[in-house]
Image: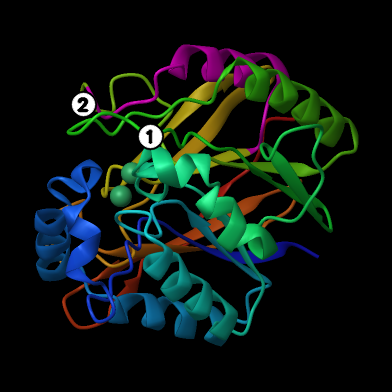
Amino acid sequence: MPLRFVHCSDIHLLDLVGTHAGHFFNKRLTGGANLLFNRGRKHDKGMFDRIVAHAREYAVDRLVITGDLTNLALDSEFELVRGKLRAAGLPVTVIPGNHDAYTRGSVRARRFEHYMAEFMDGERSGGDYPFAQRLGDVALVGVSTAIASLPLYAVGEVGGDQLSRLAGMLTTLGRDGLARVVLIHHPVMPGVAKPRHGLNDRDAFARVIADHGAELILHGHEHRRIDGDLPGPRGPVPVHGIGSGTYLSQKPGRHGAFSLYDASPAAITRVYHTWDGAKFVAEAPATIRPAA
Ligand SMILES: [Fe+2]
Ligand SMILES: [Fe+2]
């Protein structure tokens, strides 16, 4: 049986009710109030509710979210997100994005890991990341790129230790014949991210994929659709970057989006959905057959 799942990203859930002005007297959150104000105009959290409703209509096995669930990594935001995910009525897998590690304090407190633990259970070989969830013939492999960065920076980093654990995990899962779906927040193809917005150790990540392989890589962060691939040991590994799940923009490639996947070791089918201003519209299905 293929694994059927919905992928979305960068939902940046926001509820200003309950966010006290006191949060913004903190110097680390300079610009935070502006960020929330802009976010409130450009994103609609009701769209996430629609994605969950579609996921249930499609009878998916799981909902997968590749980071930036919050904006400022505040406790109040994580509480909102956790409540929404618990109410979704289906299994959920998450990884963190740079906004989920917005301040050094949130990273030190392991706030994301604390609130999201129930959506990240799985096999580990030391450290929180990567983790692997074996779901039939498919393994979801959750990678973290979340580091607190300087104001106006939105960089990410996997780090040497996590990369070596990832290499071992991909080898084991590949040997077991599973379709390996790697979840990572930042884009991983060269030249995609603007300076100050990219993955610091992108080249090292790409080398791990080139040596150890994967069947699919899913990411977010850019709030636009980016389709491509990375070299793998047996041919190209497809890389799907998805638009933000809650973005109201109608600019080409930047529409709010989610994807429906049916994944198995033999084939992966995707149906990309875009927000047309009033509803999500499904594109024609596209099938990828992993290199033999
Ligand atoms: Fe984002
Ligand atoms: Fe991001």
Pointer 2: what residue?
Answer: 194
Residue 213 falls within the magenta-colored stretch: yes
Label 1 residue SS: loop
* Quadrant (top left, top right, bottom left, bottom right) of the C terminus: top right
Q: Is residue 229 magenta?
A: no
Magenta region: 196-215
Question: Measuring 79% from the left and 39% from the top, which residue is drawn there?
Answer: 124
Label 1 sits on residue: 148
Q: From what the image shows, is residue 91 above or below residue 121?
A: below
Q: Is residue 167 above or below residue 19?
A: above
Mark nearer the N terminus (1 vs 2) = 1
Residue type at tag 1: Ala
Above or below: residue 39 compared with residue 104: below
Q: Which image quarter holds the N terminus?
A: bottom right
Depth check: give the residue in front, 209 or 114: 114
In front of the other: 110 or 85: 110
Q: Where in the figure is residue 291, as x and y percent of width and height?
A: 68, 30
Residue 195: quarter of image: top left
**Residue located at (28% from left, 20% from top):** 191
The way the protein has been coloured in the rendering is rainbow
Neighbourhood count class around disc 2 (C-alpha, 10 Å): few under 14, some 14–19, many 20 upward: few
